[in-house]
Amino acid sequence: MAFLDRFKRRGPAMSGPVRDGLRTGSTRVRASDKVDLAHLQEFVETRTGVEGFVEPRTAVSEVTLLLVAHDGEWTRRRVPSVKWAHDFANNHRVPSYDAAVVGIPQRMRDYNSRIKRQQREQGR
């Protein structure tokens, strides 16, 4: 075996759809599924003051919808598209924003800090 033969691709090409998501370069990205969508639905139905932040596709994940409740509790799931995310938010009367433009709300960071502090205190 020649040295450069070790770097040749074997099997199917690295681009294009695969059974459980997408391949982008050497990274496999999982597509959204029914479980993700059901989780988002449950979150908006059981929390108050929810806002949606649509996060664009990156090298390691598809489009995601970040939902943040009034107290900072949050969840993030993959969604089929940016349009789908805004439509989901509109259908549930949840304001939605492009996270790349407006950023992430401070109440989410505060919530994460509170949770970490509580976990440290319980571990003593």
Image: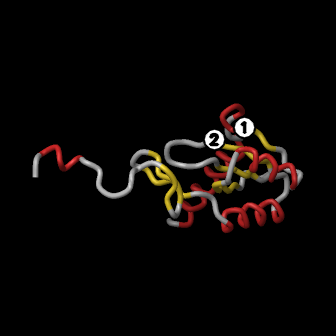
Q: How many marks?
A: 2
Side of 3 relative to 61 (left or right)? left
For label 1, the crowd category at 10 Å Cα-Cα, with few meaning under 14, some 14 to 19 and many 20 or more, is some
For label 2, the crowd category at 10 Å Cα-Cα, with few meaning under 14, some 14 to 19 and many 20 or more, is some
Label placed on residue 56: 2
Q: Position of residue 50 (x, y in %)?
A: 81, 52
Q: Secondary structure at mark 2?
A: loop
Q: What is the quadrant of residue 42 in the picture?
A: bottom right
Foreground of the two, 53 or 115: 53
Side of 62 relative to 52 (left or right)? left
Q: Is residue 53 above or below residue 77?
A: above
Q: Position of residue 27 (x, y in %)?
A: 43, 50
Q: What is the quadrant of residue 104 in the picture?
A: top right
Q: Write the residue at 56% across / 66% down.
A: 122
Label placed on residue 74: none
Q: Write the residue at 62% across / 52% down.
A: 112
Foreground of the two, 37 or 75: 37
Q: Secondary structure at mark 1?
A: strand
Q: Write the residue at 47% across / 51% down.
A: 23
- The residue pinned by badge 1 equals 98
Asked if labels 2 and 1 touch by Cβ distance under 8 angstroms, the answer is yes
| N-terminal-most mark, 1 or 2 | 2
